[in-house]
Amino acid sequence: MFKSINKFNHSETLFITLGDSICNLISEANFNNKRFSWLLSGGRTPELLFKYIKNNWIDKINWELVDVFWVDERCVNIDSKDSNFGQAHRTLLQHCKGITLYPMYKEGCFDKAASIYQNIVCSYIREFGTFDFTLLGIGEDGHFASLYRKSDFLSSAHVFVNCNQIHPHKRITMNIPLILYSKNITVIALGRSKGYAFKKNKGILGVLPINSRLWVDNEFMNEYKSIGL
């Protein structure tokens, strides 16, 4: 299912290695004077990654050639503590001079925001062909992006409003066919709870292409090793 499984004894080492890997890809694009597109998802997991990049790479990259999109977003104001955009912006992106950001939701009608974002994303794909890097996490219930049901994975590439009774906010999300327009897809899964969720819902991540990479820590593996990664 995955091109590689990257296992680390400590999450700090994982974030250092992953941060260097992402920033080296951006630097390579910089060297060739090419734009670099980065798809982000939410959750608390990426915060240490963002902090590492801020502290170690912020002045080594031409951020004017970097475009950032979001795989999913809660339908809240961008200043909300629950906003995926707000989290990434506060931790890293506000420090990246000249970077181009495409927030998925700011305010107003959820369905209209989803439609507008689909047009933006599809126009970008038509111009550049693909995204360069997608970063995904896994929720405690085994979901990724804001995809919960089998029906969420079907149909053509699009952006839509998704609801789940367990979660307090409506969400806008890309579906799988749209997420797959990416050269590199990385999934971060840390801790025993994520290992258990992954074990229960491994069929969900089975829809990802074989070029996807899984980054995990020992606690995840201790829970998940019975499956035989």
Image (tube, rainbow, N blue to C red):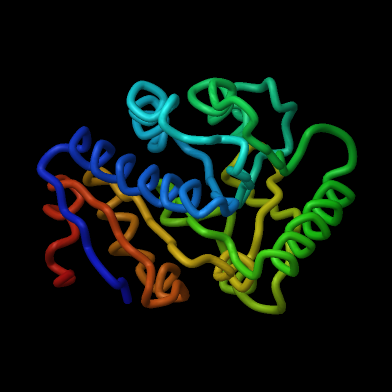
Picture mark count? 0
Foreground pick, 141 / 89:
89
Foreground pick, 190 / 86:
86
Residue 11: x and y in percent read 21, 37
Q: Is residue 24 left or right of residue 148?
A: left
Residue at the extreme front of the image, as rendered: 32
Where is residue 148, by image quadrant?
bottom right
Residue 99: x and y in percent read 62, 34
Is residue 138 at least partly visible in the picture? no
Is residue 16 at least partly visible in the picture? yes
Q: Residue at x 38, y 47 (%)?
A: 22
Q: Is the N terminus in the top left, top right, bottom left or bottom right quadrant?
A: bottom left
Residue 18: x and y in percent read 30, 45
Q: Is residue 219 left or right of residue 163?
A: left
Foreground pick, 56 / 32:
32
Q: Is residue 193 left or right of residue 133?
A: left
Q: Is residue 7 left or right of residue 57?
A: left
Vertical order, 111 against 77 (above or below): below
Q: Is the C terminus in the top left, top right, bottom left or bottom right quadrant?
A: bottom left
Vertical order, 53 against 195 (above or below): above
Q: Residue at x 38, y 73 (%)?
A: 211
Vertical order, 148 against 59 (above or below): below
Residue 2: x and y in percent read 31, 71
Q: Residue at x 43, y 63 (%)?
A: 184
Q: Residue at x 75, y 54 (%)?
A: 161
Foreground pick, 22 / 116:
22
